Amino acid sequence: MQIFDKLRILADGAKYDVSCATSGVDRKNAGRIGNASCMGICHSWSADGRCISLMKVLLSNRCVYDCEYCINRRSQDVARASFEPEELAELAIEFYRRNYIEGLFLSSAVDGSPDRTAERMLRTLSLLREDHGFAGYIHAKIIPGVSPELIHKIGMVADRISVNIEFATEHGLKKLAPQKKTPDIFLPMKQITETIADRKQLGISFRSYPGSVVTAASDLRYLQPEEATGLSLPPRGKYKERFAPAGQSTQMIIGASGETDRQIIKTSEGLYNSFKMKRVYYSAYISLISSPGLPPLMTAPPLAREHRLYQTDWLMRFYGFRADEILGEGNPFLDLEMDPKAAWALSHLEQFPVEINKASKEELLRIPGVGLVSAGRILRQRRIAAVRFEDLKKIGVVMKRAKYFITCAGRYYGDCELEPAALRNRLINGERCTDRLSLIGDGAQISMFL
């Protein structure tokens, strides 16, 4: 098979993995080829609207697993191909020299065994780094079940490494990917967390985090590696090299296995707290395979739900919200017609309106329409003079939402009562007027206000 035929097959097979952002690493060129910048690498849009990073490719799509949701599963009738490490390293460096790419996102199906596949991935990345002197961004996907020694070696040549959790509950994993085991997912996550913490000399211990159960609604547990597999981790020590300087991330499939939004965000919260994830990515399931356990073929992917989950994820990471605040036990799904901060504000109207000239930073960040940047500007302006209502739009506050939840110098500028039904209609109509693309976090996502 010609190398570009392999590229066509294996690049197409990689497009469903969305966790390919590059922020968090800044390596200057020191006589080698390429740079890795916190600005990220070049992106492109796939045919289904997802933002992908070039070069994004599988090392192989020959898989011994038969996960029901996967287009590359063993029983699926698709064209199969594999790169030799030398072929892929040469291809990547030639693409870089032609200015097609600035980095590499490398994943693979389980070709033979997890360790055999990881060894071939490591060989590819080592050729790029050592033989070709490539200093650009590399994101490597760790396959569950890989030995700790190989994870360590891959982390020393990659900028970001990730292990896909796939589903928010163990029930979903057993139902659609029975060959993947929960301990095989969490053991690498734990090793990566501890190694990064040790190299940063922060003294973070995995066992210092709460973590027996992700959520009462979920049976997905954080397991200790000894009880999970009987394996011990490599000794922790002080190293000169950097291990995965851009941290680790993971991905969950949305809409394939029946989890609620509450289960998803509770699991994400647990991953952030216990494993210090840089990002949890959400991938709306695209129905391509006929199976009794999956949505029917031609079912539209839940892109609006994916978008609301990204917004909720942002609230938890940067705005101080907890998962239990956003969705309670009696309210397991996000409102698809309204952004989650506005939905939270509507259910907590007793905390509003907030006086813009007296509110703390934490209170400002909970006002719909006030973001991190605009909250900082308001606090800086207040040290000089009182903030006027006409200043807020210049500061960056989204007034079509914020005006209903604030007062300015004691005056309320909203043109309706603080009543949930009336406010909901106005907020939804305001969102329907907005139809644009926006950046969410350090990866581009489609912003759909429905």
Image (spheres, helix red, strand yellow):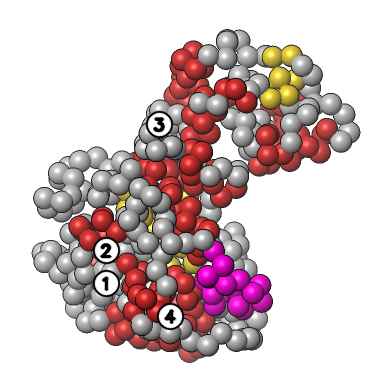
Mark 4 and mark 1 in contact? Answer it, CB < 8 Å.
Answer: no
Q: Foreground: 352 or 120?
A: 352
Task: Say which quadrant the N terminus sits in.
Answer: bottom left
Disc assigned to residue 335: 3
Q: Foreground: 366 or 142?
A: 366
Give the mark nearer the N terminus: 3 vs 1.
1
Amino acid at pointer 2: Gly
x%, y% of residue 142? 38, 73
Mark 3 and mark 2 in contact? Answer it, CB < 8 Å.
Answer: no
Question: Of tags 3 and 1, which is closer to the observer?
Answer: 3
Mark 2 and mark 4 in contact? Answer it, CB < 8 Å.
Answer: no
Disc 3 to disc 4, C-alpha distance:
39 Å
Amino acid at pointer 1: Ala
Residue that badge 2 annotates: 13
Dot 3, crowdedness within 10 Å: few (<14), some or many (≥20)?
some
Question: Of tags 1 and 2, which is closer to the observer?
Answer: 1
Dot 4, crowdedness within 10 Å: few (<14), some or many (≥20)?
many
Question: Of tags 3 and 2, which is closer to the observer?
Answer: 3
Give the mark nearer the N terminus: 2 vs 4.
2
x%, y% of residue 333? 37, 36
Amino acid at pointer 3: Asp
Q: Is residue 47 above or below residue 303?
A: below
Disc 1 to disc 2, C-alpha distance:
9 Å
Disc assigned to residue 109: 1
Q: In the rendered structure, which segment of residues is drawn in magenta?
A: 193-209
Residue that badge 4 annotates: 151
